[in-house]
Image: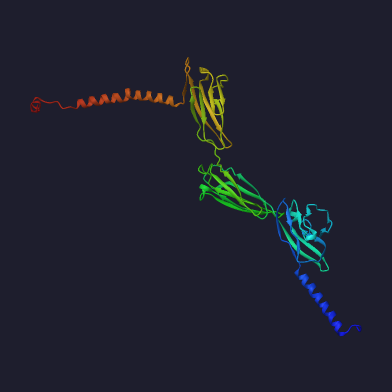
Amino acid sequence: MSGFSPGMLHLLLLLLLLLLLNLIWTVEAVRVVGGNVSVVLGESATLPCNLLDTTETLTQISWQRMTKGKPENVNFITILADKTHIYNAADYRFKNIGNFTKYDGTLQLSDATLLDEGSYSCIFTLFPSGNFRTDITVNLLVPPVVTVEDDAPLLGGEEASLATCTAAGSRPPAEVKWIMGSLEGSVRSTTTSTLHDNGTTTTVSSLLGVPTRDVNQRLVRCVVTSAALTQAKSLPFTLQVFFSPTTVNVTVMSDNSLECMTEANPAASFTWSRADKSWPQSGVTVVGPTLQFVRNTAGVNGLYQCEASNLYRRSHGYVYVHVTSGSCTVCWVLFSLLLVLFAIGLAAWYYLFIFRPKQSRGESTHAGRQPILTDDEEAETPT
């Protein structure tokens, strides 16, 4: 340092200090801008990375990741001025969509999976300042699969599960609610959640109530909301209460047809048979609940049975059919006609043999009890 004068040495130290301060100021001014990302399973995500406030020479942009699928934090992409290198099994779902000359190292990830969730680092290498980085967190969203199932409640007087709404495999967990409409206050819901190993959650909500006829065919709605859904899912559902066939009624539809009717859920199937004789093969036909008489002959006379059945029980109804010989009209007798005729005969018998003799005896008794007037009493009787 003997060759430098004290003034020269002082000047050199001042220049070095200025260079150092300028370098510090430059480093502090440089900013790497990124931002956390949320992406829906199977869709594409943009991982932003931009270097701001520098004019230094950019030598390369590096990307590192530490994810569920790649737990080791290593370089997997290097971006140079004229090309891009992809390392570690060459995951070509990642694409450089930035601009090297504009200090833009943005990546695009296609077909995101749960294994892509984790931390990503974007690193700019400048000369002479060195490396500048930002960390980006990628969060995976999984929309739920929503279904509503009928729990097939049987008609009864105790509370049972009427329907179940399931939001399966959601991340984050979905919220499930019921819109009960006119049943508000008479039914309630219970909800349970199950966390799976892959980080998704299944939420199940059951609608509980007493399965009465009033509940049957009522419309409710299951509404599911989730951060993974762009809008809530709303599924309408008609409640079903199941019961066996009620009273089976046989109705005369025309001169040559009968129809079997009942109420059941699920709907009953009908079987016609003849209870007292073999089936008249050529005389009648059956279409569902309808019994059709093709020939109005005495061969179709007899007692017919209609059986209504579903999964839960069988019920029966009966009708007696009689065709008058030589007539073209089938006389439908549902037993009640016989009862009417019997009642008329019984009434006539009662009138002729019970009521009238009693009335006659009553009149005779009354006449026998009249006083016999003497001549004096007759004389005192006013005229």
**Color scheme of the displayed model:** rainbow
Count the labels in the image: 0
**Residue 166 drawn at (x, y percent):** 63, 49
Query: In front: 275, or 364?
Result: 275
Query: In front: 70, or 277?
Result: 70
- From this view, report whether residue 11 is shown above or below residue 264: below
Name the residue at 61% across, 44% down.
149
- Quarter of the image with the N terminus is bottom right
> On the picture, is 329 further left or further right than 10?
left
**Which of the 4 image quadrants contains residue 39?**
bottom right
Query: In front: 277, or 373?
Result: 277
**Which of the 4 image quadrants contains residue 374?**
top left
> On the picture, is 194 further left or further right than 362?
right
**Residue 45 drawn at (x, y percent):** 73, 54
> On the picture, is 150 further left or further right than 136?
left
Query: In front: 237, or 33?
Result: 33
Q: Residue furthest right?
A: 3
- From this view, report whether residue 24 is shown above or below residue 332: below
**Residue 250 drawn at (x, y percent):** 49, 29
Residue 87 in view (yes/no): no
Residue 8 in view (yes/no): yes
- Quarter of the image with the C terminus is top left
> On the picture, is 269 further left or further right than 253?
right
**Residue 376 drawn at (x, y percent):** 8, 26
- From this view, report whether residue 172 is shown above or below residue 306: below
